[in-house]
Image (cartoon, grey):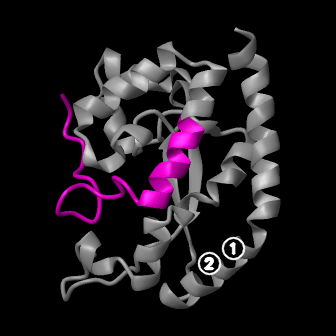
């Protein structure tokens, strides 16, 4: 498929480079604010599975601090989410650094969101099909509920995207993403700062 193998990768790198240039002022401002909000740690790095399950290091803006309880355990996510971090997450600015992942070739602009490596052994064959393509900054599941939908629905939407990749679909997802960001739709799961962990089928 010409679009999937040639046009989409070219579009990814070109769009990421243009995006980094245009968003550089915002990138710098957010970095400075998070530097002070998170004790000198504006970025969040974490290993995630990419295409064919290949592990890569994702980079995002750090929206939560590292505050711990008396026993040395990290406090719940909702208590560690800073005011600056809440704004950055609500406006989806925390995703901007992932443009670097796209330039490197680990990610695509559009594709299934890369989940935690600790979930990999929990996937069934159907769920694991999400790794047949590069993970994306935004995707079909993100514009159809994001963190506000169930895990089963999220996997269903991810695999549907894998089977139906096309230029028109990617354009549709891109525009719907812009609408979602403006409305701050589906950022968190109901009554939670983050979505509940995946427990398997």
Look at the image and give the residue range highlighted in magenta. 173-201
Residue depicted at 69% across the width and 44% down the height: 102
In the rendered picture of this protein, how many numbered marks are placed on residues? 2
User: What residue sits right under mark 1 in the picture?
Assistant: 26
The residue shown at (19%, 40%) is: 199
Q: Secondary structure at mark 2?
A: helix
Can residue 167 be seen here? The reply is yes
Query: Is residue 194 shown in magenta?
Result: yes
Local SS, label 1? helix
- Is any atom of residue 50 visible in this view? no
Across and down, in percent, residue 67 comes to: 33, 84
Q: Position of residue 83 (x, y in %)?
A: 40, 84
The span from disc 2 to disc 1 (Cα, nearest Å) is: 6 Å
* Image quadrant in which the N terminus is located: top right
Question: Label 2 neighbourhood size at 10 Å, few (<14), some (14-19), many (20+)?
Answer: some
Q: Main secondary structure of the magenta part?
A: loop
Compared with 196, 170 (above or below) is: above
Q: Residue at x 27, y 66 (%)?
A: 193
Q: Point out residue 162 in the picture as x, y percentages from the top left corner.
A: 50, 19
Which one is in front, 157 or 79? 157
Query: Can you say which quadrant of the picture contains the C terminus?
Result: top left
In this rendering, position of residue 172 left or right of residue 32? left
Q: Are marks 2 and 1 in contact (CB under 8 Å)?
A: yes
Residue in the image at 68% along x and 52% along y: 99
Q: Which mark is residue 30?
A: 2
Q: Relative to residue 73, is residue 42 drawn left or right? A: right
Q: Quadrant of residue 21?
A: bottom right
Q: Quadrant of residue 129?
A: top left
- Describe residue 117's horizontal placement relative to residue 174 as left or right: left
Residue 153 in the image, given as x and y percentages of width and height: 27, 30
Tell me if mark 1 has few (under 14), some (14-19) or many (20+) residues whose alpha carbon lies within 10 angstroms of its own. few
């Amino acid at each position: 498929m010409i679009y999937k193998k040639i046009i989409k990768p070219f579009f990814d790198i070109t769009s990421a480079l243009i995006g980094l240039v245009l968003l550089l002022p915002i990138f710098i401002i957010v970095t400075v604010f998070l530097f002070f909000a998170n004790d000198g740690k504006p970025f969040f790095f974490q290993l995630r599975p990419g295409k064919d399950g290949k592990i890569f290091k994702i980079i995002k803006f750090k929206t939560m601090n590292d505050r711990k309880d008396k026993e040395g355990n990290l406090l719940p996510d909702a208590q560690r989410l800073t005011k600056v971090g809440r704004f950055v997450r609500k406006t989806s600015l925390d995703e901007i650094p992932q443009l670097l992942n796209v330039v490197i070739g680990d990610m695509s602009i559009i594709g299934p969101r890369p989940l935690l490596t600790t979930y990999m052994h929990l996937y069934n064959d159907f769920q694991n099909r999400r790794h047949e393509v590069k993970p994306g900054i935004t995707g079909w599941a993100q514009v159809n509920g994001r963190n506000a939908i169930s895990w089963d629905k999220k996997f269903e939407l991810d695999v549907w995207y894998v089977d139906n990749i096309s230029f028109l679909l990617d354009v549709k997802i891109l525009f719907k993403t812009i609408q979602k960001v403006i409305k701050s739709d589906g950022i968190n799961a109901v009554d939670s700062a983050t979505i509940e962990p995946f427990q398997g089928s």
